[in-house]
Image (tube, rainbow, N blue to C red):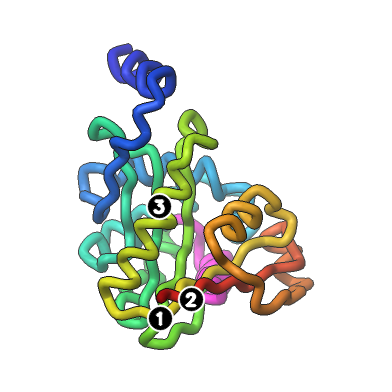
Amino acid sequence: MIKKKSRMNDIKNNNFYDVKISGLELHELDSFMAILIDAFFEKLKLIYYHNKYAAYNIIKTDIHRNIKSKRHYAARLNGMVIGILDLITHDNLKNYNRSFRTYIKYLGLTKALKAFALTRFEIPRLSPKTLYIDNLAVDKNYRRKGVACKMLSFAEDKARKNGKSALTLWVAAENKNAYRRYKKSGFTDVIIKSYKFLEKYLGYRDWIYMKKEIL
């Protein structure tokens, strides 16, 4: 009850300038996962055979194994996680440790083979000078309050401090809200690709690769 009241007060008072962003802590993992599954399960459900329990536990296990990877970030308001962000670099991608055994545990061998292959397809190819933005999402109670834009600004600052020359991302062409947000933040279209098999598994055929140069 206290947490719900605090949440309502934050929304009412619009204290979003107090949002702080930093690396995900292990004790925040359940909150991080709740936002991730709420935002992305519709995209992930065919990969994980509509098994939300499997998707939750496989992804959570991978993040837990890689909590120190400097890949996963949380946006917090009054200590509560309200946004999530994955920032992928050439280095943390190379060292990210995923367990095929976890896929087998929750899906069985046959389904695990397909799911593991499809999730590997999502991994971008990066140059050492690129920072890739992945899995940006905001708790549904805090959307349209500028939190996503603040996370994008954080990503840009992080890229600049680490000597990166560009931010990149893929967005589904049908995801108009996200696409407009990225355009507003200075991203430009690089290429549009159509993947028939991704439409089968992710629900979207057309994807836009976007980029923002870091000055």
**Disc 2 + disc 1, Cβ < 8 Å:** yes
Q: Residue at x 30, y 80 (%)?
A: 163
What distance separates the C-alpha of mark 1 from that of mark 3? 18 Å
Q: Total number of numbered labels?
A: 3
Question: Percent from the top left, x then y, of residue 141?
Answer: 48, 29
Kindly tell me whether residue 62 is visible in this rendering: yes
In the rendered image of this protein, does residue 201 appear above or below residue 35? below
| Mark positioned earlier in the residue sequence (2 or 1) | 1
Q: Amino acid at mark 1?
A: Ser
- Residue 200 appears left or right of 112: right
Q: Residue at x 40, y 55 (%)?
A: 85
* Quadrant holding the C terminus: bottom left
Q: Which residue is mark 1?
A: 165
* Residue indicated by mark 3: 151
Dominant secondary-structure state across the stretch colored magenta: helix
What range is drawn magenta here?
A: 106-122
Q: Which mark is residue 4?
A: none
